[in-house]
């Protein structure tokens, strides 16, 4: 939304706030919006290289220069902070020392506290008032336009996805993003939809969220309470760990698919120091990672100024504190991504992945995913509200601990050895440093001073020790990780480490699962009554990379262009619209035959769009524009185009008559529409080919009966000049295709209209 020039608004949905068009205003998006979209995925390897010069040594935690446990030594900031108040303290230091003029933070809504939103805080008071964590989605980057207008330098606090997006925008030169000189962010395991809070309220007999006067996710002594005060003065409180029982019921999809736990693209990232040693003391302790030189310098100066207490710990100890969540992200999330992808859903591409994951870990994931799947049903969400809170919290916590204990061997086993491969580079990371249990410090007790009563005296910075990551401003990121070949193996095959081969049961399991998922998907396409542009885009985005390659050898694919050209009498150098232009092959083909003077390629899939634009530049077409399609109202003038090409397109829309009507509107009088769409008889064959993996699926679609199709084009103001049904043998050995062509020529007007694959219409726009 921050990149939509005010043409989108945030709409509250059960899946958190989502951008939606403002009625009556055509959507306009900054071209950077797609590049920086975390839903599409940000390429982490490129971002690592850009920010830190190398890939990380440790792919579980990202780049780490200095890792420690600490807290703000200003009691008020520490008390109000989610853990040790380190993020807030860093922002305050930056502002007070004149390094920034404002900070992008998240503030609880006013007067509706549940509507948290991003602000640019300009004073210490504003920064401190925004401390604590908000565990429901807050669209921080909606503030980009304000950042662009802001006069001065900024710090920025965001969740990993938001930070990745900001970094991408910095890379691409967005003026608002370039004002940010320091990026901070929390570790993020899971976040929950706001429905979790509503559910908690209902359990307490409050049905209307408007009753809420104050909402704190981490109030009181660390680790804190969810605390809600109502307008009538009632206060509800539940321990953070007990309140976590709602996670399986309301966990957000984005946090299940995010692979970055420790906010790897920040200058400084901060999490809770989950360890009995610190939890026992209360007060609030953060685990802090300085990733960049800037982050390290800032923290060292805070330590020197006496506002930050520091106990150095090693990377091992820091990883060990969060081993379960690291596993949840660095193996679990990759498994979930792969499964989702196999089900035909769009997933973010992060540019790297674990080379292999053992079957035992996948079985653990199956249990987790099944649990979440069951808990997220409406029935169970409602049912849990009737269990007394005094029971459900402790029971959940006991179960969580038991599950952690049971799954620990499988989850930890192999975690540190997991090599990660950067997609497309055939390079894999070396094993991670071992995740040992927290190491006892030499000399016994931790060096953080006792925290009761008065704040202790500042500590002087420590000298660099022999171990890595224990000294500020000394260590520099080392060269790139050593590499070992990772081959083109599929990431989720269970690979025998000795032979490097995939086991036969694994192959059978994988292929059967894939066929079952394809069948389920095709059944869904057959039965769904309605679907959105986003659903179509999802399918084609997923397909984009392989689309040309798959179609390369499919005889019927290119016939759509050659048949279209031979059937229609087209004027030369026309103003040309290619609707659902996919990878731009049609426009390129007609351009190379002199039929295109200027072109507009409209398409639902951005990924296809990228390929299309590249192709058209390569063929030398200078006057073209690529336009994203969001809805049926096409963003063109009446009668704008001389020639409109709509090949194998209309069947993808759940309301094809609306699309065809729009094609009528934008074609000039006497202009030509060439429309092709498959014969309904071929629908089962298309689906079967997808299930058997012989061809790509058509995605969401409904084939249109011939008479209905003719009625639609006439209704849209066209006269049908020529109608033929083409292609008998769509693919296969050359002799079969030749036979097909021979039969086709002889049955052109007899059997072909019945059994041919593709309806082709050449239509002329009537003069009104
Ligand atoms: C959704 C979420 C999930 C988390 N999961 C984990 C976890 O699994 N394990 C773990 O160790 N730590 C987790 N954390 C981090 C932890 O809760 C603390 O934020 C972190 O320890 C920093 O503490 P602090 O006292 O230094 O932060 P503070 O000094 O309290 O500052 C927090 C800063 O974060 C900003 N902020 C708060 N919520 C959001 C939000 N939703 N979006 C953007 N900015 C926000 C605030 O504006 C503030 O500037 C999570 C945080 C969030 C928001």
Image: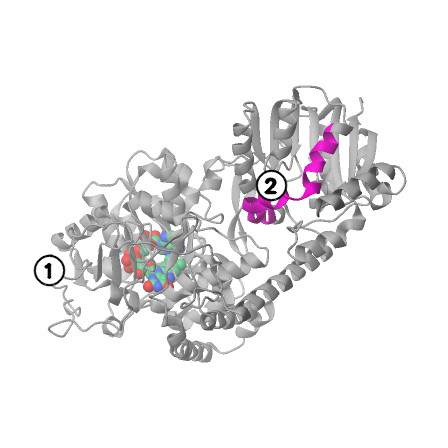
Q: Which label sits on residue 565?
A: none
Question: Is disc 1 surrounded by few (<14), some (14 to 19) or many (20+) residues within 10 Å?
Answer: some
Which quarter of the figure has residue 563?
A: top right
Foreground residue among 183 and 290: 290
Determine the residue positioned at 39% across, 71% down. 411
Which residue lies under the disc numbered 2? 604
Please tell me in which quarter of the rendered image ligand 1 is found: bottom left
Q: Label the magenta part by its dominant secondary structure.
A: helix
Percent coordinates x, y for residue 114 in the rendering: 45, 56
Helix, strand or loop status at disc 1: loop
Which quarter of the figure has residue 737?
A: top right
Determine the residue positioned at 62% across, 36% down. 581
| Label 2, ligand 1: CB separation under 8 Å | no
> What span is in magenta?
538-565
Distance from disc 1 to disc 2, alpha carbons, whole Å, reads 58 Å
Task: Indicate left or right for 698 with 424 as reference.
Answer: right
- Residue 554 magenta-highlighted: yes
* Sequence-earlier tag: 1 or 2: 1
- Residue 467 magenta-highlighted: no
Which quarter of the figure has residue 582?
A: top right
Farthest front residue? 735
Which residue lies under the disc numbered 1? 459
Determine the residue positioned at 40% across, 68% down. 498
Task: Indicate left or right for 238 with 473 as reference.
Answer: right
46 versus 568 height, above or below: below
Helix, strand or loop status at disc 2: loop
Task: Indicate left or right for 355 with 749 as reference.
Answer: left
Percent coordinates x, y for residue 51 in the rendering: 30, 44
Q: Taking the image as drawn, is residue 749 in sight?
A: yes
């Amino acid at each position: 939304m921050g990149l939509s020039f005010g043409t989108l608004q945030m709409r509250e949905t059960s899946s958190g706030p989502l951008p939606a068009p403002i009625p009556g205003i055509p959507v306009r998006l900054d071209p950077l919006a797609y590049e920086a979209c975390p839903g599409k995925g940000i390429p982490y390897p490129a971002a690592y290289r850009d920010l830190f010069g190398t890939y990380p040594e440790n792919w579980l935690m990202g780049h780490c220069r200095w890792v420690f446990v600490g807290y703000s030594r200003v009691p008020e900031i520490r008390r109000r902070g989610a853990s040790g108040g380190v993020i807030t303290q860093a922002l305050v230091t930056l502002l007070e020392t004149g390094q920034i003029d404002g900070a992008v933070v998240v503030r609880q809504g006013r007067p509706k506290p549940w509507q948290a939103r991003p602000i640019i805080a300009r004073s210490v008071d504003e920064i401190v008032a925004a401390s604590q964590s908000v565990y429901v989605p807050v669209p921080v980057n909606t503030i980009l336009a304000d950042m662009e207008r802001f006069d001065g330098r900024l710090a920025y606090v965001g969740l990993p996805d938001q930070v990745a997006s900001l970094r991408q925008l910095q890379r691409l030169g967005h003026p608002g993003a370039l004002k940010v000189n320091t990026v901070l962010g929390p570790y993020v395991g899971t976040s929950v939809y706001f429905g979790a809070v509503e559910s908690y309220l209902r359990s307490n007999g409050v049905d209307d969220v408007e009753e809420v006067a104050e909402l704190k996710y981490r109030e009181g002594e660390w680790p804190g309470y969810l605390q809600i005060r109502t307008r009538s003065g009632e206060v509800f409180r539940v321990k953070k760990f007990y309140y976590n029982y709602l996670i399986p019921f309301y966990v957000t999809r984005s946090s299940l698919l995010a692979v970055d736990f420790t906010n790897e693209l920040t200058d400084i990232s901060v999490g809770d120091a989950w360890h009995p040693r610190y939890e026992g003391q209360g007060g609030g302790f953060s685990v802090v990672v300085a990733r960049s030189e800037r982050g390290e310098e800032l923290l060292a100066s805070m330590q020197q100024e006496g506002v930050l207490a520091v106990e150095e710990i090693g990377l091992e100890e820091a990883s060990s504190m969060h081993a379960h969540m690291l596993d949840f992200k660095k193996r679990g999330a990759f498994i979930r991504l792969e499964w989702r992808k196999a089900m035909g859903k769009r997933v973010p591409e992060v540019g790297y992945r674990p080379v292999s994951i053992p079957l035992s870990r996948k079985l653990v994931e199956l249990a987790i995913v099944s649990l979440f799947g069951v808990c997220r049903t409406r029935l169970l969400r409602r049912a849990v509200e009737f269990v007394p809170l005094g029971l459900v919290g402790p029971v959940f916590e006991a179960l969580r601990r038991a599950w952690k204990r049971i799954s620990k061997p499988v989850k930890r086993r192999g975690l540190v050895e997991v090599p990660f491969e950067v997609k497309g580079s055939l390079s894999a990371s070396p094993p991670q440093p071992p995740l040992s249990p927290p190491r006892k410090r030499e000399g016994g007790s931790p060096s953080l001073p006792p925290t009761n009563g008065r704040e202790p005296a500042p500590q002087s910075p420590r000298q660099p020790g022999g171990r890595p990551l224990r000294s500020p401003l000394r260590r520099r990121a080392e060269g790139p990780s050593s590499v070992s070949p990772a081959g083109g193996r599929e990431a989720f095959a269970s690979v025998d480490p000795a032979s490097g081969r995939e086991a036969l049961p694994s192959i059978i399991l994988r292929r059967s699962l894939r066929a079952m998922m394809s069948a389920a998907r095709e059944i869904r396409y057959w039965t769904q009554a309605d679907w959105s542009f986003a659903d179509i885009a999802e399918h084609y985005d997923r397909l984009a990379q392989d689309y040309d390659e798959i179609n390369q050898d499919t005889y019927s694919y290119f016939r759509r262009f050659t048949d279209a050209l031979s059937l229609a009498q087209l004027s030369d150098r026309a103003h040309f619209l290619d609707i659902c232009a996919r990878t731009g092959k049609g426009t390129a083909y007609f351009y190379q035959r002199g039929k295109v003077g200027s072109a507009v390629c409209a398409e639902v899939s951005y990924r296809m769009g990228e390929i299309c634009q590249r192709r058209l530049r390569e063929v030398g077409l200078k006057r073209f524009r690529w336009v994203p399609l969001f809805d049926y109202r096409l963003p063109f003038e009446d009668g704008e185009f001389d020639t409109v090409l709509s090949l194998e397109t209309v069947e993808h829309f759940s309301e094809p008559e609306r699309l065809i009507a729009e094609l009528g509107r934008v074609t000039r009088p006497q202009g030509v529409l060439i429309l092709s769409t498959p014969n309904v008889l071929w629908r089962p064959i298309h689906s079967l080919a997808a299930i058997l993996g012989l061809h790509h699926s058509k995605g969401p679609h409904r084939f249109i009966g011939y008479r209905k199709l003719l009625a639609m084009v006439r209704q849209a103001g066209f006269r049908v000049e020529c109608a033929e049904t083409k292609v008998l043998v769509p693919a296969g050995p050359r002799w079969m295709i030749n036979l097909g062509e021979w039969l086709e020529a002889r049955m052109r007007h007899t059997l072909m209209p019945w059994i041919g694959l593709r309806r082709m219409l050449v239509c002329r726009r009537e003069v009104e």
